[in-house]
Image (tube, rainbow, N blue to C red):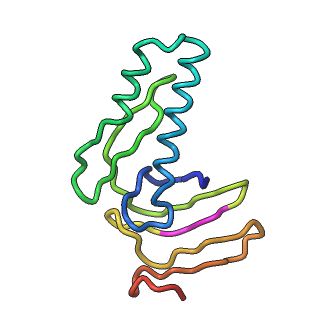
């Protein structure tokens, strides 16, 4: 799964990384459940954590809800608007580069393979068609 650098989490549009945020949320839930099972013996804390992760924020458009680490072991759920450069890396290399403007992809977005070769281009300033 690509790790995001310099961008906000959950994306609910037709973005190429639209479902990556949900995977992170499920991973956080799985980690919480593992801690509960191994350390805490699954007390009522798990129900509280589930309620937290299942809560839907009413983020005004174009903002999107995002979970991130907070404090030493906590999590926050906030609304963010993607704006500015976006770079995602995977397996030690840059996988994707692009630009957001007020929550929307703009300009040319480039996907790379492990050797740094561009394998896909999409120009969002045109009719969202591939080159």
- Identify whether 26 is placed above or below 93: above
Q: Residue at x 73, y 54 (%)?
A: 92
Classify residue 40 by image quadrant.
Answer: top right
Rendered residue at 54%/88% (across/down): 131
Q: Is residue 27 magenta?
A: no
Taking the magenta stretch, the answer to whether it contains residue 95 is yes
Q: Position of residue 75 (x, y in %)?
A: 43, 30
Instruction: Please report the bounds of the magenta region as a residue range.
Output: 94-98
Q: Is residue 7 left or right of residue 38?
A: left
Tell me the chief SS of the magenta region: strand
Q: Nearer the viewer, residue 40 or 123?
A: 40
Q: How many marks?
A: 0
Residue located at (46% from left, 68% from top): 99
Residue 93, located in which quarter of the rendered image?
bottom right
Return the x and y of residue 112 as percentages of the image width and height. 66, 71
Where residue 69 appears, as percent x and y from the top left, is 47, 33
User: Position of 85 compared to 65: left or right?
Assistant: right
The image shows residue 66 at horizontal and vertical percentages of 39, 44
> In this view, which residue lies farthest toward the right?
115
């Amino acid at each position: 799964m690509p790790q995001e650098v310099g961008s906000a989490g959950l994306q609910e549009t037709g973005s190429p990384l639209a479902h990556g945020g949900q995977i992170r949320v499920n991973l956080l839930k799985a980690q919480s459940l593992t801690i509960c099972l191994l350390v805490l013996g699954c007390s009522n804390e798990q129900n509280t954590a589930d309620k937290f992760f299942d809560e839907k924020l009413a983020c005004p458009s174009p903002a999107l809800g995002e979970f991130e680490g907070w404090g030493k072991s906590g999590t926050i759920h906030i609304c963010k608007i993607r704006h500015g450069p976006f770079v995602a890396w995977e397996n030690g290399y840059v996988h994707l580069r692009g630009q957001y403007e007020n929550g929307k992809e703009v300009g040319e977005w480039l996907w790379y393979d492990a050797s740094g070769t561009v394998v896909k281009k999409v120009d969002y300033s045109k009719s969202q068609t591939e080159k």
